[in-house]
Amino acid sequence: MSERPEPLGRPYVHVNCAVSLDGRLAFAGGQRAALSGPLDLVRVQRLRAELGAVLVGVGTVILDDPSLRVHWELLRRPPGPSPVRICLDGSGRLPAAARFLDGSQPTIVATTERNRRTYPAPVETIVAGTGPDVDLRRLLDALGERGFRGLLVEGGSHVISSFLRAGLVDRMTVYVAPVLIGGATAPSLIAGPESHSVDDWIELRRESVEPLDDGVLITLRPRDSAPRAPPSPL
Ligand SMILES: NC(=O)c1ccc[n+]([C@@H]2O[C@H](COP(=O)([O-])OP(=O)(O)OC[C@H]3O[C@@H](n4cnc5c(N)ncnc54)[C@H](OP(=O)(O)O)[C@@H]3O)[C@@H](O)[C@H]2O)c1
């Protein structure tokens, strides 16, 4: 099937994450694990810069406190426009001291009607649905109306699950590091609803598998989705 350019509408959604060989996103209890190798880190910087917006859930902000900025030095380029960072914070749990709220780059909190909290300027707030979770379709529509053409979803487990189960993913890349984490509390690639049979698992189609650093990079698409063209590369 050939890729068609996307007319105005929802942004192109690319999910990216790094996992251990046993499919864990982090250490026990969700403690951050640096699973990417140096080449994978460069690849992620490029994705952030190309897609123009980076989204995580509030669970990731609480556990990792990520900056979500582009490390231009890794791309060996002069600094370009910062991607807009977006956090799903349905009930106002975002820590006030998080780097996410430091005002250093354009920032959006996506929330729900049940959250009465306000966020410091210049953070923009998008209210998508009544809750408890942020309504992802409404959020993507709102981002499309604001002219967003691409969105990089970086996690964590619950957010990746929600995007996949809602059928809102265009492409997914998973860097698999040759390490094993194990245990019961390390978060896996997806959380959310359990699958009981082939009727409710999530089926993906492999686009490519390539060696990268000491691991492999797997590129996938949801099995039955019509391919859409990503925004233009840098
Ligand atoms: N290896 C990697 O590539 C990578 C990347 C990112 C994160 N991580 C890891 O992932 C872990 C965090 O994952 P997590 O599952 O705990 O948290 P998460 O997915 O980052 O955030 C989940 C939270 O987001 C809020 N939310 C609002 N709307 C939502 C929606 N529609 N769908 C899903 N969530 C929504 C909910 O909190 P409210 O109910 O309060 O709104 C929910 O509990 C950390 O251990 C982190 O290190 C790893």
Image (tube, rainbow, N blue to C red):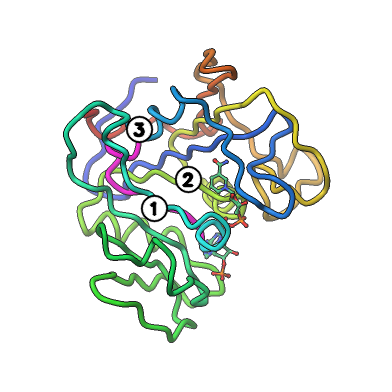
Residue matched to label 1: 67
* Residues packed near mark 2 inside 10 Å, few (<14), some (14 to 19) or many (20 plus): many
Q: Look at 53% across and 22% down and name the residue there.
A: 217
Q: Look at 36% across and 67% down and name the residue there.
A: 101
Q: Amino acid at mark 3?
A: Arg
Looking at the image, which is closer to me, 230 or 30?
A: 30
Inter-mark Cα distance, 3 to 2: 19 Å
Residue 81 in the image, given as x and y percentages of width and height = 18, 45
Q: Secondary structure at mark 2?
A: strand
Q: Secondary structure at mark 3?
A: loop
Q: Please report the bounds of the magenta region as a residue range.
A: 47-57
Q: Look at 17% across and 40% down and name the residue there.
A: 80
Looking at the image, which is closer to me, 146 or 84?
A: 84
Is 100 covered by the magenta stretch?
A: no
Q: Look at 27% across and 48% down and name the residue there.
A: 83
Distance from mark 2 CB to nearest ligand 1 atom below 8 Å: yes
Q: Mark 3 or mark 2: which comes first in sequence?
A: 2
Asked whether disc 2 touches disc 1, contact meaning CB atoms under 8 Å apart, the reply is: no
